[in-house]
Image (cartoon, coloured by chain):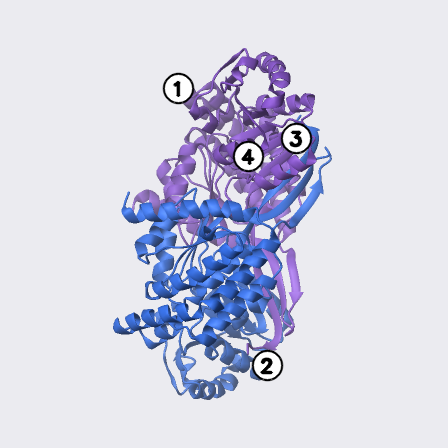
Chain colours: A purple, B blue
Amino acid sequence: MSNLRQTIEALAQKARQAARVLSLSTAAKRTEAIQLIARAIRKNAADILAANEVDLKHAQATGLSPAMLDRLRLDQGRLEAVALATETVATQADPLGEALESWTRPNGLKITKLRIPIGLIAIVYESRPNVTVDAAVLCLRSGNACILRGGHEALRTNQALANAIHEGLQTAGLPTEIVTLVPVADREAVMILGSLRGIVDLIIPRGGPGLIEAVTATAQVPVIKHDAGICHIYVHAAAELPMAEVILLNAKCQKPGVCNAAETLLVDASIAANFLPQLDTALRSRQTSIRACPLAQPYMPSSHAASPADWATEHLSLILNVRIVPGLNEALSHIAQYSSGHSDAIVTNDTIVAQRFLSEVDSACVYHNASTRFTDGGEFGFGAEVGISTGRLHARGPMGARELTTWKFTIQGNGQARA
Amino acid sequence: MSNLRQTIEALAQKARQAARVLSLSTAAKRTEAIQLIARAIRKNAADILAANEVDLKHAQATGLSPAMLDRLRLDQGRLEAVALATETVATQADPLGEALESWTRPNGLKITKLRIPIGLIAIVYESRPNVTVDAAVLCLRSGNACILRGGHEALRTNQALANAIHEGLQTAGLPTEIVTLVPVADREAVMILGSLRGIVDLIIPRGGPGLIEAVTATAQVPVIKHDAGICHIYVHAAAELPMAEVILLNAKCQKPGVCNAAETLLVDASIAANFLPQLDTALRSRQTSIRACPLAQPYMPSSHAASPADWATEHLSLILNVRIVPGLNEALSHIAQYSSGHSDAIVTNDTIVAQRFLSEVDSACVYHNASTRFTDGGEFGFGAEVGISTGRLHARGPMGARELTTWKFTIQGNGQARA
């Protein structure tokens, strides 16, 4: 067994024992711990920002892109936002102990389906250090211990944040191993976490395709992946065109680097001449490049020809694919072929067409007359989120504290034996 | 790519397309198909029993144990039971299309969490051919296509059953690929099914430890395992002893070869002298061997010494482990160490002790004053079951049609864009 494997397995075993202690804590104790973590983050702000300075200097020296440097950067304002988000989770309803269902069988057995924590959750993610706190606190709210592996650029920042989290846990009288940081950021650490059957109950990868692929292909524990969003906006012949433009511009341009941003616009042929030229102007004024199909190109002077690969690409930037379709059936076929199953939308005033779209598109979130950008735990009203599941098992779409729970059955009798 | 891989991947791709068709069918159509399958099983009884004859002859020639031969055997009565069970599933409520939750956000977006099928489910199992029909029909009820790999001893029987299922599907006007039988039974076929990311949505292994291990260690698609049941009965100092005896004898002796049967009895030291001698007699009269700890042996004249391995063994036969414990805490520790997380029970009239047991034992089903043998889809009122999940994700405990579903969100607006 490699040294790294020994180290991580030992950390995970301790985290598992801490999970057991946490699972027997009260909701009030978990709330207190979350509040104390927010306080410790504010108290340790100088240490955290100093560690972040060092991480930023190293990252600059290794030539990290400005966008990535920005994701890595903390300042007083951003850190206060992290503390405030933590306090919000403290006010969220505690999901544990809820009786999801309860019924009595004809033989008198009373069966109760009770919400309980999953146990020990491994979360692997990339550069943004605020994920360290978000994930830890959401696991704490749902009674789970977590073992976190952040990005290597953020190692010192994450360690300083973990120190604050541990201070909060300790003050609350809970084991600090409830939130365990893996002290190395190699890909090997991810593989090891995914192999710890019987210790780690779930692994959640959040990050680029390489990370997701590595975990999905090798993990022996259950995986809930947070994969790419190749999201579509379909503007149907019966759409209100001004509404369609508002929705498309919001879905594409408001925050293009996130998974719920749109990549592809599908437009019914019958309205292309009315809709696309004006949209071309609006997109140009928003610095958005257009990759259009041969039918759409004549209506969009600033467009380039789309390549076959474009339809299957998550651009994560100000690039929009545009394709003209004859109608609903072809739009559904395109989405069935290219959607990553994250979020897809139709704009139409035809309720029968909308109903078919809502029922036939097999994505986590299917929209009628709204932007795909609403696929988000906060926007759904779930409070904080650990991410957006693109898997089909256990959790689909935005994952809040409730999605980090499972259940057990309690069965109460008075001597029943099976006939 | 091996020939076998090509064959199975092609079958799975067709099954996936059929899943799409099925997911858009009506509940009435699925009910009709299930009824037609029951009819086709009765109509094809002669063919099915003839195929079973051949399988039995081969199995006898290869020296299969009498117990395994019995599991493989179909006769007119057993086949009629399969047809009746199928008809029962036809009367079960259809789980699809149910709005699990629905709410309106302050911005006017109406969000609905809608129950939908998982997609294509691979089920791998061993000798009992009735599983072929049970699994197929339960998947059909929940709108899922399935790809089945049964035991090699039952290949001809399963093929004959699949022919009947296909006849039913065809008469209902549904694609026969909804239920696809893998025509070979090697372990390699299981590995291939588990590797089909993007085609197979879930793999469910049902069988011995070797099969479960092979799937869990190698699958790249989500797994819901149906693992061993190392189940405990804890008789607390405040138990009614006659009730405890009824429950223990039921849990151990009524059907010892199943996963919800008990393997280990834990008894409080203070009642051992009152409880164990009489139990020894009762167990002896039921041909049950006893493996006892040193403290229990003097009270149980027919016992042998338990070995350390016994506590961790699913005997699946008339063997009971017995251990005396000082009290609740030690019983909880023993269960935390050795339980497989399937089903564990306490017998006591002390409600505070019972409450601690129900809350601290982390198993799928935790019982108070009842036999563990009730862990069963039918006994829970779920109708037919595809098995008992010993995993923690997506489904825990008995899995009926509802546990074979997932959800999507539909979001309806009137032009909302994110601020």
Mark sitting earlier along the chain (4/1): 1
Q: Quadrant of residue A379?
A: top right
Residue sitting at 35 percent across and 72 percent down? B53
Quadrant containing the C terminus of chain B in the rendered view: top right
Mark 1 sits on what residue?
A61
Residue sitting at 44 percent across and 32 percent down? A208
Mark sitting earlier along the chain (4/3): 4
Label 3 Cα crowd, 10 Å radius (few <14 / some 14-19 / many 20+): many
Mark 4 sits on what residue?
A332
Mark sitting earlier along the chain (1/3): 1
Horizontal side, residue A412 vs residue B54: left or right: right
Q: Amino acid at mark 2?
A: Glu
Mark 3 sits on what residue?
A370
Visible residue check, residue B170 = yes
The percent coordinates of residue B361 (x first, y second) are 53, 63
Label 1 Cα crowd, 10 Å radius (few <14 / some 14-19 / many 20+): few
Q: Nearer the viewer, mark 4 or mark 1?
A: 4
Q: Who is closer to the viewer here, B38 or A267?
A: B38
